[in-house]
Image: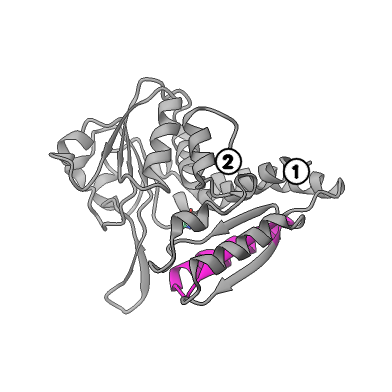
Amino acid sequence: MEVANNKLLKGADLAAKLLMQVAKDAKDLKSKDVPLGIAFISIGEDPASKVYLTRKRKIAASIGIESIDCNFNENTSTEKLIYEIEELNKRKDVTGILVQLPIPKSIDSFKAINAIDPKKDVDGFTVENIGRLITKQKCLVPCTPQGCVALIKSVEQNISGAHAVIIGRSHIVGRPLSELLLQENCSVTVLHSRSKKPEEIARTADILISAVGEPKLVHEGWVKPGAIVIDVGITRAVDENGKKKLIGDVDFENVINKVKAITPVPGGVGPMTIAYLMKNTIDAAKLFI
Ligand code: GUN
């Protein structure tokens, strides 16, 4: 299907622009002998996590950020993980730490994430950073929500007063994104699995963001004509020829005719998440100068 190019919100293009600036900042910091290093913690062998981490490491390397790989087996205890995180907190060459999610249920993810020094919490997931975000203090802000806002604002700079509907209330995307959009003076509605008449509410959105992981949940009937649609959902599937593919939450082909702008999957939000991870790593390193 031919897609009207001017409606396609290509995160890859915007991410490349952001990364150019981040690379400049990285070079500048390195010339001042400021270390730049992200510790990537993963537990077990989740295939999707491996793909994401490979991508994150590759982009980090391309802009001069060191990667420190910390893979633990799936029987690792919460205590052992916290001990290792505390060791990373002490290291001068580690300026950012992230725990790639999901992690096994046997580990207390809340305790593990909150063992990260908030100044090195490049995902912005610690209680301290989330608390600072909602009280509008300087902090490290979760990457995917930052990417969503940048994509939206690349279409419409002033979104004050717009009705933004977020589908999904996760700590990683939905909740922090609701805060960022409130800070842009949007009226924000968050829909979730218990919401009544979600389709009717979604249809009133000027800006519609879906972050659920349910393929094609958002079909034509959920979308107001002229809306900006951001698809954060990624589901791994296999097509009729046995080829692996990624499917978003939005029924892209049937929705594109109605919208002002829409992100594709893949190549939409994903690259923006990584670009903001790199930006956060630079911002985190500056906290130690
Ligand atoms: N798993 C899915 N998205 C993310 C993310 O933004 N950060 C981390 N650490 N894990 C994830």
Describe the colour scheme in one phrase. one colour
Q: Hey, which residue is sitting farthest right in the picture? A: 32
Q: Considering the numbered disc 1 on the image, is that residue within a helix, a strand or a loop? A: loop
Q: Which residue lies furthest to the top in this view?
A: 161
Could you say which is closer to the camera, residue 222 or residue 130? 130
Identify the residue shown where x is 44% and y is 66%. Answer: 107
Tell me the residue that label 1 is attached to: 288
Residue 197 in the image: state x and y as whole percent: 13, 39
Q: Which secondary structure, mark 2?
A: loop
| The quarter of the displayed image where residue 14 is located | top right
Q: Can residue 38 be seen in this view?
A: no
Q: Quadrant of the C terminus?
A: top right
Judging by the rendered image, the residue that carries numbered circle 2 is 140
Amino acid under disc 1: Phe
Q: Do the residues labelled 2 and 1 touch (CB within 8 Å)?
A: no
Inspect the image, locate mark 2, and give the three-letter code of the amino acid beneath it: Leu
Q: Give the range drawn in magenta.
A: 37-66
Confirm whether residue 199 shows in the render. yes
Q: Where is residue 226 in the image (x, y as percent from the top left)?
A: 29, 32
